[in-house]
Amino acid sequence: MAASIPTLQPFNGDAIPQELKAQKRWAPWRAVWNAKRGKFDKIPMRADRPDCGISTAKPEQWASYALALAAYQTNPKLLAGVGYVMTGPHGHVGTDLDNCVQGGVIAPWAREVVDQLASYTEISPSGNGLRIFSLGELPADWNNHETGIEVYGGNEARFLTLTGQHLAGTPVDVRPAPAGALKALEARYAKERRKVEVIDLNMPDVIDDLLLPSIENLDIPYSARDFLETGTHRGDRSRELFATAVALYAAGLPDDEVFSVLAYNQHAMEIALDHRRQDNDRALLYLWREHCCKGKAASSRRLTADDFDVIAPVASLELATPGKPEKPMRFQFLQAGEFVKGEEPEYLVDDVIPQAGLIVVFGESGSGK
């Protein structure tokens, strides 16, 4: 029996501090249930075009609080709420505490963090977590998924969804983090950052994004373009990422450009980080090995007749394919060239499927057509 999909907390931004509302860092967001992860994927969308996603790395796509709120209120069936873009240091720190509220009771460790930071705190959309916003600077974002704490100071592309459900007993405004509080929190909960032990010497460096081709100008399928721009995926996210890597190679991009396009892309990196427990170095290596290296091989592969299984024929079917394989196939190919005289064709599959040719493949059910 499939697990039931949980209900998200409703959004009401009345209690959100003006300090945050004044920032042009807002976007409405969609909630897409991810059965594999057992949680919602939260996808930031454009306020002016709510059916299109934004990049949390592109400030020109972010909106004012008023515009983001209006988009949500106008499209309640499409959008789940409003969120805040943390990308880029701007004197604000967001602390995300997961799975720390059960039946309205806050776990002791989470209560200690809330008291330590002493700033505006609210219930997360899941109803099981807390969001804390403080004033301060953070040299590096960090997390501890075993405990369930993530702290963002704008050093990485991040988007925090809000509810406006203020936690009673906490300040109603965003306050400076007490002296030493952020460092003490990191010292207690942050895991030691370890570099990848084995470095793939063939992995290229990430090149400057100003030197990369624009996604809009790439000759790639719409599905790949949609994934890179909005994170849209038709099923398994990893397969969509792999298909996008294949498309980039097929468009003629070299290794360093394909790798860099994916490394700079929020949606690709989100998948990579999820696969490597939010370790940035391992996530990059995952992109290179699993998607760039294998995607390049897939994009350059050219089918030949050897790729088709040669199986004993069914009943009295005769082979109608030019050339003589070692054993006859159990389905037939009839080529337009057999009926019309013309120029010698170029083949997609050597001596089997001609380029720009009309072909009929037929055989009994289950024959592998």
Image: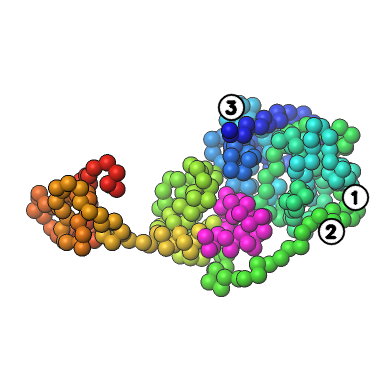
Q: Residues within 10 Å of mark 1 (few under 14, many from 20)?
A: some
Name the quadrant of the N terminus: top right
First in residue order: circle 3 vs circle 2:
3
Q: CA distance from mark 3 to mark 2?
A: 42 Å
Q: Nearer the viewer, residue 207 or 274?
A: 274
Q: Please name which of the two marks, 1 or 3, marks the residue nearer to the observer.
A: 3
Disc 1 to disc 3: CB gap under 8 Å: no
CA separation in Å, label 1 and label 3: 41 Å
* Dot 3 amino acid type: Lys
Q: Secondary structure at mark 1?
A: loop
Residue range corresponding to the magenta coloring:
263-290
The part of the image, by quadrant, that contains residue 72 is top right
Residue 309 visible in the picture: yes
First along the sequence among labels 1 and 2: 1
Query: Label 1 belongs to which residue?
Result: 178
Residue marked by disc 2: 187
**Label 3: which residue?**
77
The percent position of residue 123, horizontal first and vertical second, equals 77, 35
